[in-house]
Image: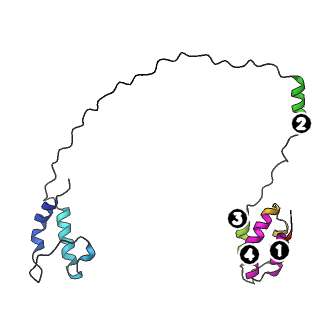
Amino acid sequence: MHASLAELVTALEPALKTNDSGQPRAYCENIFDVPRAELCTMLATLRNVFWSHSITPDNREEPVNRAIPTKTISSPAAIPDRAIELPQTTEPDKETSLAIAAQPSTTKGPRRKTTGLWPFKLSMMRQMKMDSARYNEQEILASLAKANWSPAEKRHLARYLLPVALAMRRQAVAHALQRWLSKKG
């Protein structure tokens, strides 16, 4: 299938005549090793060698599939099917069923959809970085005021956004974020 190196040498022999100094030209292992003046001739030579059908295909015989010795695998002795005994269900006591029904639900009601921290941080960063013509401080302060996250999440947001607010000289936003950091609980 692939040409051997000897077949390539015989096919390239006419193209590998001696160069200007009388020495035989070497094959190029890397196309970047060929001087620019000889590039077209080398590419034509390689094209003729690799894409012409003058080279005989390799007639190696494929190895014959050897028979894999089969091993007899003994199966374990048949396990008798045992009937799985389930405990008999008894009628639940009326007292326990009433006690379960009387317990209040532990859920705190329907969950409200909140914006994740990352989209909020990204939106606040964009708003704080806006130029003075598009910057709306009241909108930023309103979104900070109606933020309904836990105190730990508020501290995280404040630590993340406070350096940006100070660097962008957004004093009112920086003051609101510092209040979040100073609150305990």
Q: Which residue is mark 2?
A: 103
As helix, strand or loop, the secondary structure at mark 2 comes to loop
Q: How dense is the environment of label 4, judged by Cα within 10 Å: few (below 14), some, or many (20 and up)? A: some
Q: Quadrant of residue 136?
A: bottom right
Q: Nearer the viewer, mark 3 or mark 1?
A: 1
* Residue 147 can be seen, yes or no: yes
Q: Is residue 71 left or right of residue 2?
A: right
Residue at (10%, 78%) from the top-left corner? 23
Contact between marks 3 and 1 (CB within 8 A): the answer is no
Residue 170: give x, y in percent of width and height: 78, 81
Contact between marks 4 and 3 (CB within 8 A): the answer is no
In the rendered structure, find residue 127 and report the number of the disc placed on it: 4
Q: First in sequence, mark 3 or 1: give its number.
A: 3
Residue 107: give x, y in percent of width and height: 83, 45
Question: Could you tell me the amino acid type at mark 3?
Answer: Trp
Work out how far the residue at label 4 is from the one at label 2, CA to CA, in angstroms.
48 Å
As helix, strand or loop, the secondary structure at mark 1 comes to helix
Residue at (83%, 22%) from the top-left corner? 92
Q: Which residue is mark 1?
A: 178
Task: Say if the magenta span includes residue 6.
Answer: no
Magenta-tinted stretch:
153-181
The vertical placement of 182 against 72, above or below, is below
Residue 109: give x, y in percent of width and height: 85, 47
Question: Could you tell me the amino acid type at mark 1?
Answer: Gln
Q: Which residue is mark 3?
A: 118
